Amino acid sequence: MPPDDALRDRLVRVGAELLRTESPGSLSLREIARRAGVSHGAPRRYFPTHLSLLSAIARSGFADFSEQVTAALRVSPEDPRSKIKTIAFLYVRFAATNRSMFELMFRHDVLSSGGELGLRDASLPLFRLLTDLVAAARPARTAPQVTAAAIWAALHGTAQLWNWGSLALATDATDPSPFIDATLIAHLGPEGPP
Amino acid sequence: MPPDDALRDRLVRVGAELLRTESPGSLSLREIARRAGVSHGAPRRYFPTHLSLLSAIARSGFADFSEQVTAALRVSPEDPRSKIKTIAFLYVRFAATNRSMFELMFRHDVLSSGGELGLRDASLPLFRLLTDLVAAARPARTAPQVTAAAIWAALHGTAQLWNWGSLALATDATDPSPFIDATLIAHLGPEGPP
DNA sequence: ACCCTTCGTAGACAGTGTCTACTCGCTCTG
DNA sequence: CAGAGCGAGTAGACACTGTCTACGAAGGGT
């Protein structure tokens, strides 16, 4: 493949940019093309379908989040428990900061499109990291995979429910921290001394 | 208001029916009208916009789930821990059985439309029930609202991640039960004797 | 009998995703 | 150097969508 498909990258960037200000419903193929300054048929050269373009944009969102995680882990304390906490808060904050992108990233039709395994595998490395951290942070009672998955699901649900205000409505909390803390304490025990 | 807006109910029923076989993307205004045997302008008499019709359909989904919960609680053991477990498994199973409906029910644009508080409050009674059960099932260490919210978020995330196969891909589990159990044990302690 | 309110129809309009035919530029080849 | 071939992007058509507006057909009240 050519080293720089300029338009291809530009379309993805424009889409991600558009997603920072507009709802994912506004991510029409034609609107992206318009903002990229090309005709509405141009994207077809790189993305056979609208969904595949959305999939590429979502993939860029996963990449962005992944970078943020590694950056945050660099400045986080070394012990696994602190690292898990860092990831947990970043997950929910990322979802709250990039609402539309988060929504797009986890749309099932977007997830299922794309490569062979689709986009689902984009979250696999992060999950493995979480599994390792859980195994290190916690006395091995049950399988760390199960605990890691349960934590992941809890974070995802917290991000989602918080994003559309259901948690705030139900508990009149002003930020999602208590729920994150409750989840981590429940699964990993109270925060121990260093 | 008249006692029976026949068409109004029929549109909602047809929509919910359509949702049992098709993806929520196929829930177009015109398709619903077609299947209801009326012209594409007819729904406008009852629902000013497409979104408001979707909102009504989602509301019927909440009502359906609510009925299932009360029915399941009738045959569940009396102790609060068992009731929580009943609700938890039902939540995830409902999401897996009625995928499209579940997806529609928790679309933020659908949630925000509708009445004054929107559709978010449709889940409030269930949440209060869960809070009471948590308060009764568990030694009062932290606020039961926080624990109940954390459990709800965990269930929701489990349902969602399970529905599109991410959990299965990450842990190659064949059903979501282990994650539900892990969540309940983490938050409420191991299952006690009867 | 007449009006007039209610419910539904039918057509227009802008916008969308997809498909196809086409027109530029460029490079590679004879 | 001339010309064929090809890649990239344009432009128009098609079916479909949601919304809006004008219209028609029953039916009941005075």
Image: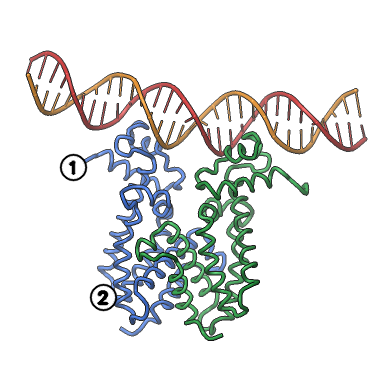
Chain colours: A blue, B green, C orange, D red
Image mark 1: chain = A
Residue found farthest to the front: B174
Q: Please name the amino acid that badge 2 sits on.
A: Glu
Please state the horizontal and vertical placement of residue B148, each as a whole percent of the image: 53, 73
The numbered mark, 1 or 2, whose residue comes first in the sequence reads 1
Q: Mark 2 packing: few (<14 Cα in 10 Å), some, or many (20+)?
A: few
- Spatial separation of the CA atoms under disc 1 and disc 2: 38 Å
Question: In the figure, is residue A25 to the left or right of B8?
Answer: left
Q: Looking at the rendered structure, which numbered label has been put on residue A3?
A: 1
Q: Nearer the viewer, residue A173 or B54?
A: B54
**Snapshot quadrant of residue B118:** bottom right
Above or below A13: residue A126 = below
Image mark 2: chain = A
Please state the horizontal and vertical placement of residue B114, each as a whole percent of the image: 62, 51
Q: Looking at the rendered structure, which numbered label has been put on residue A78?
A: 2
Please state the horizontal and vertical placement of residue A7, each as a whole percent of the image: 27, 38
Q: Please name the amino acid that badge 1 sits on.
A: Pro
Residues flagged by tags 1 and 2 on a common chain: yes
Q: In the rendered structure, are the residues bearing label 1 and label 2 in contact, judged by CB atoms less than 8 Å apart?
A: no
**Snapshot quadrant of residue A147:** bottom left
Above or below B101: residue A12 = above
